[in-house]
Image (cartoon, helix red, strand yellow):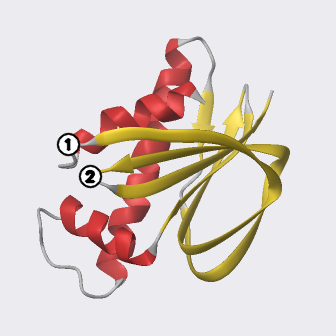
Amino acid sequence: MNPFIQAFFSVMPQLGFDDIKKEGISLKDDNLISTGVIMTVGIVGEVKGNVVYCIGLEDAKNIASTMMMGMPVEEFDEMAQSAVSELANMLTANAATYFSEIGITVDISTPTLLYGTNVSIKMSSNQVLCVKLSANGIPFEANIAING
């Protein structure tokens, strides 16, 4: 869990966010249901699993706007989708770097982006660690399911 938290605190300021917080940690079961934007990234190597990032649709547009230097984002179009997908990639790649610093080799998949209402995702582990974070008041959830 710590590499993912470290990644959030490292990456978000680089993208223009200055108020970064860890809001809480909880356990969830392996059937994740979310509304909004969901980005899932697979993890392979010495540890295996996946991480699923969840944010509200309006929050995703705000994040995309900040990532694009304040350009207004009215629609969650291809450009906005690309920006938040890249965020998932940056966060997970950064976490992989932190894993390597403690001697654990992992590789990550390309992020898959979904959005909608009541999207159901089956996680790769029976127990999922949910880390609630925020950046400039925007709630951000990282659901981590790792085996090994």
Q: Is residue 121 left or right of residue 115?
A: right
Which residue is drawn at the image coordinates 20% and 42% (left, top)? 18
Q: Point out residue 48 in the picture as x, y percentages from the top left corner.
A: 75, 37
Q: Which residue appears farthest toward the right when viewing the image? A: 126
Q: Residue sitting at 22 percent across and 48 percent down?
A: 17
- Is the Cβ of the residue at disc 2 closer than 8 Å to that at disc 1? yes
Q: Quadrant of the N terminus?
A: top right
| Residue matched to label 2 | 136
Separation of marks 2 and 1 at Cα, in angstroms: 6 Å
Residue shown at 39% from the left, 74% from the top:
81
Q: Residue 24: horizontal and vertical position, in percent?
A: 55, 40
**Which of the 4 image quadrants contains residue 121?**
bottom right
Lower sequence index among marks 2 and 1: 1
Circle 2: residue type:
Asn
Residue 83, percent from left and from top? 32, 65
* Label placed on residue 2: none
Q: Secondary structure at mark 2?
A: loop
In the rendered image, which residue does mark 1 sit on?
18
Q: Nearer the viewer, residue 81 or 129?
A: 129
Kind of element beneath mark 1: loop
- The answer to whether 83 is drawn above or below residue 91 in the figure is below
Looking at the rendering, in which quadrant would you find the C terminus? top right
Q: Quadrant of residue 137?
A: bottom left
In the shown orientation, is residue 3 left or right of residue 17? Answer: right
Please state the horizontal and vertical placement of residue 96, each as a whole percent of the image: 52, 31
Give, as a three-letter code, the residue at label 1: Asp
